[in-house]
Amino acid sequence: MYYVDNAEGTLVNVTPPIPYNAGYEFAGWFKDTDFSHPFVFDDEVIPTKQFDDESKLINITKIYAKWQVK
């Protein structure tokens, strides 16, 4: 998982480095843990932060690394 911080209301301006995981090949970044929705850095706008009644952040943008066995 990779957190995108301080980019609310804008396109993602940083692409994380390609991660390493011994015995696996990196297969891309995704919006979901089912790996059915790719995260396209050139197209994604981070939503404005929203908080609940207790000032807890409720819309955190997360991206997930997909791995394939080598």
Image (cartoon, rainbow, N blue to C red):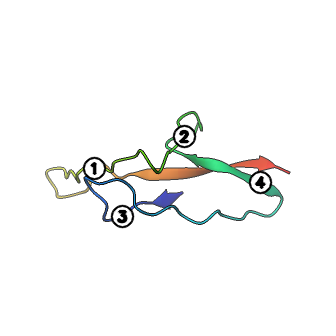
Question: Helix, strand or loop at disc 1?
Answer: loop
Question: Helix, strand or loop at disc 2?
Answer: loop
* Residue ID for mark 2: 38
Work out whether residue 17 or residue 64 is closer to the camera in this orientation and state it: 17
Work out whether residue 12 or residue 31 is closer to the camera in this orientation and state it: 12
Mark 3–mark 2 Cα distance, whole angstroms, equals: 19 Å
Give the mark, 2 or 4, whose residue is nearer the N terminus. 4
Residue 63 placement (x, y as % from top left): 50, 51
Question: Helix, strand or loop at disc 3?
Answer: loop
Label 2–label 1 contact, CB within 8 A: no
Residue 37 lies, with reference to residue 48, above or below; the image says above
* Residue ID for mark 3: 5
Mark 1–mark 4 Cα distance, whole angstroms, equals: 32 Å
Q: Which residue is drawn at the image coordinates 19% and 52% (left, top)?
A: 51
**For residue 22, which quarter of the picture?**
bottom right
Pair 1/4: label in front: 4
Q: Name the outermost residue toward the left.
A: 53
Mark 2–mark 4 Cα distance, whole angstroms, equals: 16 Å
Label 1–label 4 contact, CB within 8 A: no
Q: Residues within 10 Å of mark 3 (few under 14, many from 20)?
A: few
Residue 15 lies, with reference to residue 32, above or below; the image says below
Give the mark, 3 or 1, whose residue is nearer the N terminus. 3
Q: Amino acid at mark 4?
A: Glu
Q: Amino acid at mark 2?
A: Pro
Mark 2–mark 1 Cα distance, whole angstroms, equals: 22 Å
* Residue ID for mark 1: 58
Give the mark, 1 or 4, whose residue is nearer the N terminus. 4
Question: Helix, strand or loop at disc 4?
Answer: strand
**18 lies left or right of 41:** right
* Residue ID for mark 4: 25
Q: Amino acid at mark 1?
A: Ile
Q: Amino acid at mark 3?
A: Asp
